[in-house]
Image (cartoon, rainbow, N blue to C red):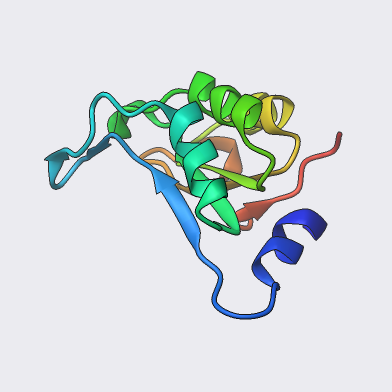
Amino acid sequence: MGRFRDGLAQNGLTAIAEVKRRSPSAGELRPDADPAALAAAFERAGAAAVSILVDERFGGAPADLAAARSASDVPLLAKGFFSERAELEQLRRLNRQHCARAPAHRAGPLRGRSRRSRLPR
């Protein structure tokens, strides 16, 4: 977790900013959000990391992670509900850093695994 942990271990108050277009409970938040522009702006504002919602239920997609990565050097956290290892591996290839998962409605083969996954490169 080196780079992500290092980003959060800076002196003083650190924050993880988030790119999220929609909330299942609150509805549309920012449907026109540009992940690249937001990640770059969050980095300029001093965010230690940026969380990117890549799940379609939140208006996100894996392409949002790639867009944010192209515009920012801060550590990125891909968030969503994943049920297959292949989903995590795809995000890993796009970001090469860290993915966080929450249990999907059908846990599938990832059931019982840690919420933090370090996948092989």
Instruction: Pick whichever, 116 or 38, lies toward us.
Output: 38
Q: Is residue 100 left or right of residue 86?
A: left
Which residue corresponds to the image point at 75% horizontal and 48% vertical from the top-left? 118
The x, y position of residue 90, in whole percent, is 65, 24
Q: Residue furthest right?
A: 121
Q: Is residue 20 shown to the viewer in this render?
A: yes
Q: Is residue 44 left or right of residue 27?
A: right
Instruction: Pick whichever, 25 or 104, lies toward us.
Output: 25
The x, y position of residue 72, in whole percent, is 63, 36
Image quadrant in which the N terminus is located:
bottom right
Q: Is residue 113 shown to the viewer in this render?
A: no
The x, y position of residue 88, in whole percent, is 63, 33
Q: Which image quarter: residue 105?
A: top left
Q: Which image quarter: residue 35?
A: top left
Which residue corresponds to the image point at 64% horizontal and 55% vertical from the top-left? 116
Q: Which image quarter: residue 7?
A: bottom right
Image quadrant in which the C terminus is located:
top right
Q: Residue furthest bottom?
A: 12
